[in-house]
Amino acid sequence: MARRKAPAVQAFTTLQEAIAGLADFSRLSAEIAAVDADLQVKMSVLLKDADERKARRQAELDVLFARLKPWWETAGATVTQGKRRSAELGGCEIGVRLSPPKLAFDGKEADAIVRLFKARLRQFVRVKLSINKDALRDALSAQPVPDSPLAKSVEQLKRRLGRLSFRLDQRDEFYIQPLAPKRDDAASEDQSR
């Protein structure tokens, strides 16, 4: 896939231009936040309405299911003439089928794992290994307390992890964070436009 070059932009050249650009950035960010807030309100209203309508219909479905199940148990064989386990009626397929297989075992899972290990059936036990990134980050960023008995072990651990290629990677990243408008500034900006 060919790489695309970003379109060229003209950088601000003066402090005044940059301040005006930042003011626009702040205004546009506030407008986006307002759109998001409006969207959340409208979505919550729509979701609440949809949930209520679905709940009413689900209640009706539950009643119909409860009435049709015993009917099928007594009339199913007659409807299919004893040849099938299901039939198409009224826009639905109704019948009896096997559920998907579900593993069952006696006792707790931990006990079942022990039984499999004792029976030398380890291929049926899944062990998932993954790097504990939080613990590594904490260990690499730990600052040993001077004159502490643990200070030496903390430094040794950091060196050992470093030899294994683990390190903290941080880079400077550019950001712009809009600030909440001050009352006086907002009023004076509105009057100047």
Image: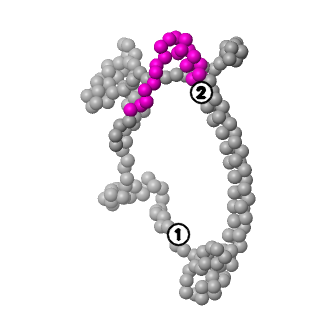
Q: Label 1 belongs to which residue?
A: 99
Residue 118 seen from this side: no
- Indicate the amino acid at tag 1: Ser
Residue 83, quarter of picture:
bottom right
Numbered disc 1: secondary structure: loop
Q: Nearer the viewer, mark 1 or mark 2?
A: 2
**Foreground: 94 or 13?**
13
Q: Mark number for residue 29?
A: 2
| Residue 42 % position (x, y) | 69, 42
Q: Is residue 16 magenta?
A: yes
Q: Residue shown at 39%/19% (left/top)?
A: 143
Q: Which residues are magenta?
A: 5-26
The quadrant in which the C terminus is found is: top right
Residue 27: image location, x then y, percent = 62, 24
Relative height, residue 71 to residue 3 (above, below) = below
Between 6 and 76, the residue placed more toward the observer is 6
* Element assignment for label 2: helix
